[in-house]
Image: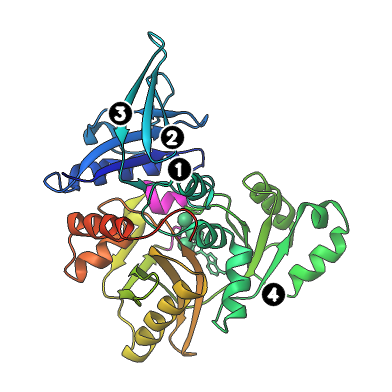
Amino acid sequence: SRPRVLVLFGGQSGEHGISCATAAGVLAAIDRDRYDVVPVGIARSGEWVLMPDDPQRYRLRGEHAYEVVADGPCVSIAPGGRVKVNDPADGSVSDLGRIDVAFPLLHGPFGEDGTIQGLLELAGVPYVGCGVLASAAGMDKHVTNALLTQAGLPAGDWELITTRDWMGDREAVCERIARLGSPVFVKPCRAGSSLGIARVSDPADLVPAIEAARAHDPRVVVEAELHGLEVECAVLGGGADAAPRCSSLGLIAVSDAAEFYDYETKYVDHDAVALTIPAPLPPRLAARARELAGQAFEALGCEGLARVDFFVDVDAELVTINEINTMPGFTPYSMYPALWDAEGVSYTDLVSELIELALTRPVGLR
Ligand code: ATP
Ligand code: MG
Ligand code: MG
Ligand code: MG
C-alpha cells in the first residue's frame, strides 16, 4: 500500500502564509500514484486542523496569503503515528489510522527550529529534513556562525546581543558593534524570510533596528556587511553513510530599488529580483562554494535538505557563508526546487526523493 504522508503547513511563525503557499505547491505536485496525503494545517494559535486536500485553496494571491484557522476538526498524533481527529461540532473523536511519514512544510520558529522535529521523534514518526539538533542550530544565526567557525568554515564576523546585554551596558554593546564597521546587518537570531532584518549605515538607526529585531527574537545578531554576489546552493541527501549532493549555484540579483534581499523582494515585488541558474561565477569560486555547502551541511549535522546562502567576492576571491536554511523556501518557484530542476530533478521527483529519504531514516532512540 502507498505510504501515508502527513503534510504539515502554516505554523506559528511569521512565515505562516509562505508555508501555506508551499503546501499549495507540494499538494499539487506530489505523486499521487506513490503516496496518500493527509493535509494538516497548524493555526497561528498552535491548533492542528485537518484540512481539505485542495491545493488551489492555499495559493498565494498577490500579497494575500492563506491563513489556517482553528475552526475545523482538530488533529493530534498519538505515539506510533496514529492520527486522532476531534470534531468540535459534535464532540466526536475518530481514528484516521497511522501515518508513515511527516513532511513539515514549515518555516521559522516552531517549524524549522527542532521543536516540531522533537514532537515527531517522540511520536515515532519519521519526517522529511533535518533532525532536532541541526534544525535548532540552523535556525539560530549565532549558533550557525559559531559552529561554522568552529569547523574552520568561513562565516562572516558577528556579535550576539542577548536581552541581558541590551538591558545592561549599552555602551559596551555599541563598542562591540562598532568593531564590525559600517554598514551592519541587524537580525533576529531565529527568523527567516528577512523578517526583522535591517541594514544600518547611520548610527542613529542602530537602536531602533535592534528593537525591531528584538520584536521577533530577544536574541539578536549584528553582522559585518558581506560583499559580492549573493548565491545559494541546494543540498540534498546525506545522513549516516551518504555524502550529500550539492546543486549548482543560483544567483540572486536584487534591483537597486531594494537595499538587500528583503521580505518585499522575496514575496511581493517579484520584479525587484532576478534569479540566475547557474550563477555566472568563475569555475574555481563556484566549485569552492559548492564544496563549502556540503561541508556546512555536515558541520551542522543536517539531513535531507538544506539551502546554504553565500556571498562571493569575485575580485577578492572570497567565499563567505551567510546562513543555512534547513527548510528553505519550497514553492515550485523557489530557489531550492529551481536549483534541483536545473540538475534534472523535477519538483515532483524532488518531493518523492525527500519522502523516500525520510522513510529510510530511523526515528526515536538511536
Ligand atoms: P531566508 O529567507 O534566506 O531564510 P533570513 O531571514 O534567514 O532569510 P538572511 O538570509 O540572513 O535572512 O538575510 C536576508 C538578506 O539580507 C540576505 O539574503 C542578504 O541579501 C542580506 N544580508 C544578510 N546578511 C548580510 C550580510 N552580512 N552582508 C550583506 N548582506 C546581508
Ligand atoms: Mg534564513
Ligand atoms: Mg529561513
Ligand atoms: Mg538567507
Measure how far apart labels 4 and 2 are at the Cα level: 52 Å
350 left or right of 156 in image: left
Residue 266, magenta (yes or no): yes
Residue indicated by mark 4: 181
Of callouts 3 and 1, which one flags the residue occurring earlier in the amino acid sequence? 3
Of callouts 1 and 2, which one flags the residue occurring earlier in the amino acid sequence? 2
Q: Residues within 10 Å of mark 4 (few under 14, many from 20)?
A: few
Of callouts 4 and 1, which one flags the residue occurring earlier in the amino acid sequence? 1
| Secondary structure under the numbered disc 3 in the rendered image | strand
Measure how far apart labels 4 and 1 are at the Cα level: 47 Å
Instruction: Check disc 3 and give the amino acid type.
Output: Leu
Q: In which quarter of the image is residue 56?
A: top left
Label drawn at residue 123: 1
Of callouts 4 and 2, which one flags the residue occurring earlier in the amino acid sequence? 2
Asked if residue 47 is positioned above or below residue 188 in the image, the reply reads above
Label drawn at residue 96: 3
Q: In which quarter of the image is residue 344?
A: bottom left
Mark 1 C-beta to ligand 3 under 8 Å? no
Measure how far apart labels 3 and 1 are at the Cα level: 15 Å
